[in-house]
Amino acid sequence: MPDNIIIAPSILAANFARLGEEIAAIDAAGADWIHCDVMDGHFVPNISFGADVIRATRPLTTKTFDVHLMIAPVDSYLETFAKAGADLITVHAEAGPHLHRSLQAIRALGRKAGVSLCPATPESAIQHVLDGVDLVLVMTVNPGFGGQSFIASQIEKIARIRNMIGDRPIRLQVDGGITSDTAAAAVEAGADVLVAGSAVFRGQGRADYAGNIAAIRAAAMADRATNAQLARAIGRMIAADGDGKELASG
């Protein structure tokens, strides 16, 4: 698992009356990626924005545009979003009958490919496509609306997918209800990319957003810091014991 935690604010929660300013603000506030939730009102019960918004805002930041397509059918739109400026395109396992083909198409366009699972979809749905993805996205809410509560039952799924990934260079992303209260559980289960919308865009601008991002990152890293401290403490104990043989044998 990568050592660093990626924080990817979802612009779905931004003020769309000044979207460009909002993206610039989260960029300056410490966002690692910009998460773009595209909804079609068909696959999910809401409509958000399309490729034109991504094209218009792409010049505002050099950060990764992480585009999550909650649309079906999806294949006919992949090239449009790639040309609009998406760096990483995630499609849903539930959105069409030929998931492997969709992922191949994304990579053929020169973009990184992601696959997402709704809460009711088992991880077995992606077992045979893992070698063709750069990211797995676990939805911890039912997709379609921002501001929902984290579905705790998905923690076990996150852990099982992390085990499935093994040593493959695949990011494991979690989206839905991520706050400073839920980030640690997601990371402990194996996530290394956290999408947060409402929890980031609270407040009035860059300073507030920076504090929100920092709080989520600190919570996410807390368990890792504790584990690192434990490892260092054990190392000191072994060193103090001389060659450590007695401690190791005990």
Image (spheres, rainbow, N blue to C red):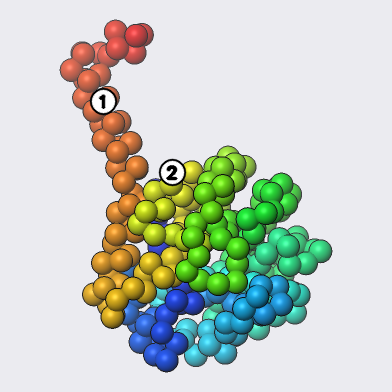
Indicate the position of residue 47 as horizontal and vertical percent values: 61, 82
In this view of the protein, which residue sits in the foreground, 203 or 25? 203
Amino acid type at mark 2: Glu
Amino acid type at mark 1: Gly
In this view of the protein, which residue sits in the foreground, 46 or 239? 46
Residue 87 circle label: none
Question: What residue sits 23% from the left and 75% below the top?
Answer: 207
Question: What residue sits 60% from the left and 85% below the top?
Answer: 50
The residue positioned farthest toward the front in the image shown:
149
Indicate the position of residue 166 as horizontal and vertical percent values: 57, 41
Label 1, residues with CA under 10 Å away: few <14, some 14-19, many ≥20: few
Give the spatial CA distance, label 1 vs label 2: 22 Å
In this view of the protein, which residue sits in the foreground, 129 or 125? 125
Residue 38 lies in quadrant: bottom right
Residue 235 circle label: 1
The residue positioned farthest toward the right in the image shown:
97
Image quadrant where one finds the C terminus: top left
**Residue 133, can we see it?**
no
Count of numbered labels shown in the rendering: 2
Question: What residue sits 75% from the left and 79% below the top?
Answer: 76
Mark 1 and mark 2 lie on one chain; the one further toward the N terminus is 2
Query: Circle 1 — which element?
Result: helix
Q: List the residue tagged with mark 2.
A: 188
The residue positioned farthest toward the left in the image shown:
240
Label 2, residues with CA under 10 Å away: few <14, some 14-19, many ≥20: some
